[in-house]
Amino acid sequence: MALLAEQEQVLWERWREGDSSRLIGRTIGASPDAVRRFLAKTGGMRPAPRRRSSLHLSAADREEISRGIAAGLSARAIASRLGRSPSSISREIARNGGRDGYRAHAADSAAWERAKRPRLSRLASNPGLLAMVRDRLEEDWSPQQIAVWLRRQYPDDPSRRLSHETIYRSIYVASRRELGARAAKHLRSGRSVRRPRGKQKSHGRGRLRNMVSIHHRPAVVTERVEVGHWEGDLVMGRRPSAVATLVERSTRFVRVVPLHAGIKADAVRRAVADDLRQLPPELRRSLTWDRGREMAEHQELAAELGLEVYFCDPRSPWQRGSNENTNRLLRQYLSKNADLRTYSMRDLDDIALRINTRPRRVLGWSTSHEQFWSLVNGLAAAQTAGPLQSDHVGVHVAAGPQSCLGRGVW
């Protein structure tokens, strides 16, 4: 059953508010399946409204033509009254049943249908551009990252540039799909229908002992002017499997820590301590965490590593926004239904490397890898004889006595 224009209007309004297909269906008097089919066809993206050109005949113009015919006026006389060309009026009458069969409403509806002229999209009409976008998308770049990269690579060639919304429409809208039917799997969300952004309700946590509030953090931490301040959290898979994620605040550099021993406080403390211990003291100044019970041994962790551990306010994950955003990116690779204990250290390092080597808008379209290692090399140059070096797979070692040998990204 096709939805009426009024139903579509309400559907898009409720969809934008974040309502489920079942609730939308109840609101507009349609089945949830009908709502889902409609959204799948459009990819969850509201089509741009069609507009009439001011040069074309309007419904009012056609009513005037119909009245002129009934009054026995010639096409020239009708055209004169409308300020139109006589040939335009003659063609309008001839293509819609002649003087005997002309009806204004039917003629206007037919003209509206004839005006549908599907055009090739920018990607469909430019195979070279399509290939470049497809290659970057298969590397799991976001549409916005691809759009900015094209502008930087071809600043003087408008034919090789397009907006990120154009890429999204080519992924989601069923009538297009130039990038392939399964292109959505390369997006962070992996969804085949685009959902509007909505607020997620958080839940409370048990209170930990002797917590230091995030409000007591020094200004250098809050303002991201000093390297070595980290945000952390757990990313859960099929319970009880999980990994810990650590994100450096100033560079957004991510480290993914396996938790093969479980998610109890002692296991998390040992795993996080072993990972951060691979960094020199100058790169492990503080750690900000949510109020999860897995950080119950935060005092022991602080004593082991010589860093400060701060905690967010209740139900305020946005206070460690860099980590929350990175965890959302990692969900593309670490599914909630996957047993994360099966991921090897190499697997997790490869995932972290994908995130760290992407251009990021928040970094001025530089990468976390570039930002982090420029700071690390500057630190090493100031303290030792030579800077740290990196190989092609992202495993980094340091020359000199203060070597930071370790797994993965080091």
Image (spheres, rainbow, N blue to C red):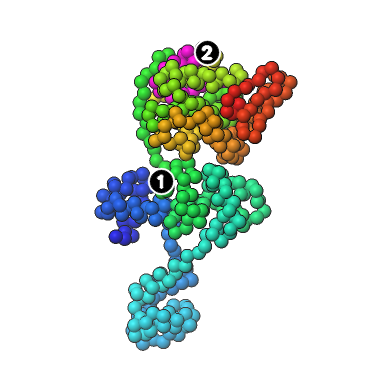
Residue type, numbered disc 1 = Arg
Q: Residue at x 42, y 18 (%)?
A: 265
| Residue lying at the far right of the rendered structure | 385
Position in image of residue 206 (x %, y %): 36, 20
Q: Amino acid at mark 2?
A: Glu
Q: Position of residue 92 (x, y in %)?
A: 43, 79
The kind of secondary structure element at disc 1 is loop
Q: Which residue is mark 1?
A: 195
The image position of residue 237, as x and y in percent, is 41, 32
Determine the residue positioned at 61% across, 19% down: 280
Foreground pick, 1 / 157: 1
Residue under pointer 2: 304
Residue 179 picture location, percent across and down: 51, 53
Could you say whether the residue bearing mark 2 is in a helix, strand or loop? helix
Question: Is 285 in the magenta?
Answer: yes
Packing grade of label 1 (10 A; few <14, some 14-19, many >=20) is some
In magenta stretch: residue 244: no
**Residue 385 placement: quadrant:** top right
Closer to the camera in the image, 333 or 307: 333
Residue range (magenta):
283-303
Q: Is residue 301 visible?
A: yes
Residue 53's disc is none
Q: Report the residue at 54% width, 47% height from top.
A: 137
Q: Residues within 10 Å of mark 2 (few under 14, many from 20)?
A: some
Measured Cα–Cα span from mark 1 to mark 2: 44 Å
Mark 1, mark 2: which one is toward the viewer?
2
